[in-house]
Image: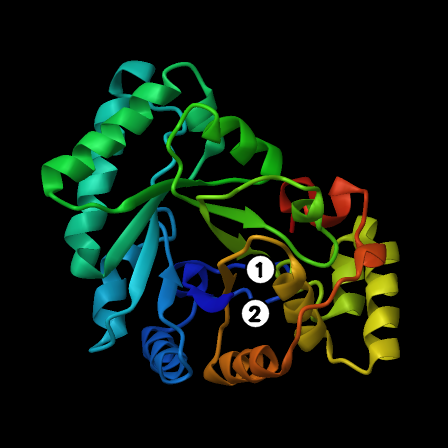
Amino acid sequence: MQLALGTVQFGLAYGAVGSGHMVAPDTAAAILDAAWQAGVRCLDTAAAYGDIEARLAALCGPHPFRIISKIAPLGAIPAAERADAVRASVQRSIARLGDRLDGLLFHSVADLEAEGGDALWAAARAALRQAGRPLKLGVSGYAPEELQRLRQRLDVELAQLPGNALDQRLTAGHDFSGIELHLRSAFLQGLLLAPERGAQRVPAAAPALARWRQHCDAAGLAPVEAALGVAQGLPGVAACVVGVETVAQFQEIAGAWARSRPLHWPEVASPEPDAWDPRRWPAG
């Protein structure tokens, strides 16, 4: 498993217990430089992350990162216009990211599971062929079951799913062979790194976060190292995507990644989606 860097914080204020501010361009460039020096070779971005997709190639400087981006969600676009919107999003991503672009994910599983979803997939494939780019095509989802359903009818090559100490659904025996699987939310938007603050922010997660803290203390592990260890212990994952706001945060994570070893702590997982699904968290 490799460490990958997410760039949502470079384009939007993001995270449940973060600073609440978008990362400044000079800081983003410094983070990317530090990531390259530490051996990170893959970046995660999206057309929906503010204007970061348009700025990312310049921020990378001379470093030839492999970049995975996401097709813009279709939202309320009328059905008759959706295929054109997909093609346009693919073309924009290629134009913005150039040779660094290695794969594209549909940002919304709902777009592919709605009526006409197969036509949207075909439109993306056609846009890639027209551009002469043999990029991997896939989907960013919220649940392993979504990916299982989609792979029955679509040639999914790349996928991103959440997984962390509280959300260990990836251990349920799903077969994702042939799919390059990227893990997001290893820190659960920072809740696992600051369990006490996290419990205040998401009360439904408080019991699970208390168990998590007890396990970290008993193992003599800092939460960052333990969280990465649990991520490394999840099956079938090729890359773990993390997000940071400062160079110091990245260096802490890179050091913890180098020290960590796969952990199997099923007892800290929560059966309550309210604890680990950000879509269910209270606003604010």
Question: Label 1: how many residues lie within 10 Å, few (<14), some (14-19) or many (20+)?
Answer: many
- Residue 282 seen anywhere in this rendered image of the structure: no
Q: Amino acid at mark 1?
A: Gly
Among the 4 quarters of the image, the one containing residue 190: bottom right
In what element is the residue under mark 1? Answer: loop
Dot 2: few (<14), some (14–19), or many (≥20) neighbours within 10 Å? Answer: few
**Residue identifier under label 2:** 19
User: What is the x, y in percent for residue 74?
Assistant: 36, 30
Residue 79 locus on image (x, y percent): 33, 16
- Between 236 and 207, the one lying in front of the other is 236
Q: Residue at x 37, y 74 (%)?
A: 28
Nearer to us in this view, 188 or 4: 4
Does dot 2 land on a helix, a strand or a loop?
loop
- The answer to whether 201 is drawn above or below residue 149 in the figure is below
Please report the residue visible at 36 percent of the width from the left and 50 percent of the height from the top.
46
Question: Residue type at mark 2?
Answer: Ser
Q: CA distance from mark 1 to mark 2?
A: 8 Å
235 relative to 134, above or below: below
Task: Work out whether 136 lies above or below 124.
Answer: below
Residue tagged 1? 15
Displayed quadrant of residue 220: bottom right
Q: Residue at x 57, y 60 (%)?
A: 15
